[in-house]
Image (cartoon, helix red, strand yellow):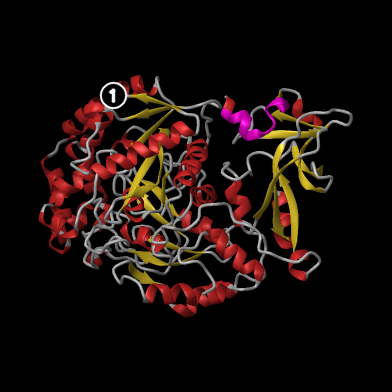
């Protein structure tokens, strides 16, 4: 076996760098895992010869962040030459071009393996509404996988691919993450373009990302995001910071809590709150009612008519070819009028104003991803009511223009996982990821079925000094946003970076918080004659071929120079030009970037 049971992006990068694996060999490994997995996960797997040709066409490793990394695509997202069916064979068409997000990931070196199963027309949170079968929880086949992005989640959780694309309109990119012990990222509306994505609710749809870690999902999200002229709902990325100090974390209390008798899920939620407190954040009780009422309104309001608008001619002419539950839900729209749509918009505006009152008291929300889970048989017997129950904490996010990250949060006694979810207003995606990653790491749950797997940063393999393997890697000292758990660490890992050790600089360095950087970054400057505490840093190593492209991507006023460490050694590392310090704040006394951010 050349990869862990549930690999991350870095596992592929490390295997390629070491020569233990090639992209061509990786294709056969992935296809073997698919062949031995749940047949309901995939609707279409690309022909082996096509995949091998794409892998071979990558050429030598070139520093692209996803070079040779396989991924899965939900079957409502176009993959050129492969039918898009949305789990409805009668609806199928074959696109000539990739969806924009797929094209961008291909440009970053990734290889799409095929199309994954879903609740038909992305209508459902359960994963059972498909003629191709119902993917099951990787922990217990009696339980639902979650939906609608069921196959995309299982493909990651079972170790077939390290990341996948889903969509999220009501929670489809987060509920399956909770049920399968992986990370699900729902970006801000419009951050990832939906050109080439079959709409569910076009004004609310998001392309979502499943991965084994927050860093991996964030890396993929950043590579796929950006304005697209072909998508009228695409928006320019303008990331906003969260407060630097301890965050005010909105939590559920009293009657706002609903777990439907699942005491273990509630205990896992309380444990997630405790981890946030241990990290220095402050829980704040909120009134969840405006969020809950918004969640209920997603299907009780006129957005059902928007779902119908996406496929109305097909619905009217081929309704008998649809899943009966999906047909019933979309059929509700036939009773709605244009006046109902406007009344729905008025009601949503009222709920948004009420939610703004709560947002004024908090910085982020911490919620259960779902209140409980269900057996497949129970959902089939009561498909609409139980599906609605699963969305009480997810449905509001797109209607209220929020971003969200769902992470593993624990296990029940029967072995089924529980998830927790951070939510923030739009365009706090980077800042929210920086909070979600340590929350996930502190729990130690994951990834996927490899539930005992370590979430510690990857370590360099033991190599004797002076050997060829050691010479193939170059050291680099990171100071701020590339530290373990910080927003840009995923880029370092994806390029094959491994953590050698945490350390400090020599005493003659000063640290500054730079002005106007996104995500926030520090500037390290050497000051001969100065005697300070030394600055906490990390020493990483990169494959030699990845070092140049990584350095070339560093924006001014930062650059790479020699950094002296407290043991007298020197290594290339991040330094700041003097011109970048004009509006910067000196933070040397904090002794490091993490300590400064924690102190607020």
Q: Is residue 207 visible?
A: yes
* In this view, 427 is above or below 77: above
| Magenta-colored segment: predominant secondary structure | helix
Q: Magenta includes 438?
A: no
The location of residue 315, given as percent across then percent down, is 18, 55
Residue at x-position 36% and y-position 42%: 420
Circle 1 residues within 10 Å: few <14, some 14–19, many ≥20: some
Which residue is most to the front?
413
- Relative placement, left or right, of 302 versus 208 is left
Residue at x-position 19% and y-position 28%: 343
- Relative placement, left or right, of 448 versus 225 is left
The residue identified by callout 1 is 287
The location of residue 362, given as percent across then percent down, is 41, 24
* In this view, 492 is above or below 116: above
- Relative placement, left or right, of 495 versus 238 is right
The location of residue 234, given as percent across then percent down, is 44, 42
- Dot 1: element: loop
Q: Is residue 394 visible?
A: no
Residue at x-position 56% and y-position 63%: 11
Which residue is most to the bottom?
49
Please report the bounds of the magenta region as a residue range.
Answer: 587-598
Name the image quarter holding the C terminus: top right
Q: Magenta includes 592?
A: yes
The location of residue 386, given as percent across then percent down, is 17, 48
Of residues 71 and 504, the one nearer the viewer is 504
Of residues 355 and 461, the one nearer the viewer is 461
């Amino acid at each position: 076996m050349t990869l862990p049971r549930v690999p991350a992006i870095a596992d592929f990068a490390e295997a390629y760098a070491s020569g233990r694996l090639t992209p061509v060999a990786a294709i056969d490994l992935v296809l073997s895992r698919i062949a031995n997995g749940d047949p309901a996960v995939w609707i279409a797997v690309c022909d082996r010869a096509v995949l091998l040709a794409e892998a071979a066409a990558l050429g030598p490793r070139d520093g692209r962040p996803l070079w040779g990394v396989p991924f899965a695509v939900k079957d409502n997202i176009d993959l050129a030459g492969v039918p898009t069916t949305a789990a409805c064979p009668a609806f199928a068409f074959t696109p000539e071009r990739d969806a924009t997000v797929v094209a961008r990931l291909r440009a970053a070196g990734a290889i799409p393996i095929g199309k994954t199963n879903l609740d038909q027309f992305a209508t459902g949170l359960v994963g059972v509404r498909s003629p191709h079968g119902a993917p099951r929880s990787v922990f217990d086949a009696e339980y639902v996988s979650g939906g609608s992005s069921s196959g995309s989640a299982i493909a990651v959780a079972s170790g077939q691919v390290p990341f996948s694309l889903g969509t999220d309109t009501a929670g489809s990119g987060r509920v399956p993450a909770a049920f399968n012990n992986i990370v699900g990222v729902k970006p801000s509306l419009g951050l990832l373009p939906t050109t080439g994505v079959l709409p569910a609710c076009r004004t609310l749809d998001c392309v979502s990302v499943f991965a084994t870690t927050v860093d991996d999902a964030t890396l993929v999200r950043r590579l796929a995001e950006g304005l697209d002229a072909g998508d009228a709902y695409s928006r320019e990325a303008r990331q906003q910071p969260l407060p630097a100090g301890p965050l005010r974390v909105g939590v559920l209390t009293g009657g706002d809590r609903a777990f439907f008798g699942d005491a273990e899920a509630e205990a896992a939620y309380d444990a997630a709150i405790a981890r946030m407190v241990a990290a220095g954040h402050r829980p704040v009780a909120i009134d969840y009612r405006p969020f809950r009422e918004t969640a209920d309104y997603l299907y009780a309001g006129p957005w059902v008519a928007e779902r119908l608008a996406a496929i109305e001619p097909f619905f009217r002419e081929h309704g008998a070819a649809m899943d009966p539950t999906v047909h019933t839900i979309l059929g509700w729209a036939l009773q709605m009028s244009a006046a109902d749509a406007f009344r729905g918009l008025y009601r949503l505006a009222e709920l948004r104003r009420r939610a703004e009152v709560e947002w004024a008291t908090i910085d982020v929300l911490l919620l259960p991803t779902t209140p409980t889970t269900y057996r497949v048989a129970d959902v089939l017997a009561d498909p609409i009511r139980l599906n609605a129950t699963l969305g009480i904490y997810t449905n509001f996010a797109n209607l209220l223009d929020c971003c969200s990250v769902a992470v593993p949060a624990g296990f029940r006694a029967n072995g089924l996982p529980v998830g927790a979810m951070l939510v923030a207003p739009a365009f706090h995606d980077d800042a929210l990821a920086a909070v979600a990653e340590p929350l996930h790491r502190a729990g130690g749950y994951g990834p996927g079925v490899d539930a005992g797997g370590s979430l510690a940063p990857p370590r360099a393999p033991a190599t004797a000094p002076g050997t060829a393997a050691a010479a193939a890697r170059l050291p680099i000292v990171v100071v701020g946003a590339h530290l373990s758990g910080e927003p840009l660490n995923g880029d370092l890992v994806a390029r094959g970076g491994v953590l050698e050790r945490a350390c400090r600089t020599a005493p003659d360095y000063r640290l500054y918080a730079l002005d106007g950087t996104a995500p926030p970054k520090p500037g390290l400057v050497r000051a001969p004659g100065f005697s300070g505490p030394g600055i906490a840093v990390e020493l990483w190593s990169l494959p030699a071929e990845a070092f140049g492209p990584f350095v070339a991507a560093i924006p001014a006023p930062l650059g790479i120079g020699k950094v002296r460490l407290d043991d007298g050694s020197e290594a290339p590392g991040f330094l700041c030009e003097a011109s970048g310090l004009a509006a910067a704040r000196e933070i040397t006394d904090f002794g490091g970037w993490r300590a400064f951010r924690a102190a607020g």
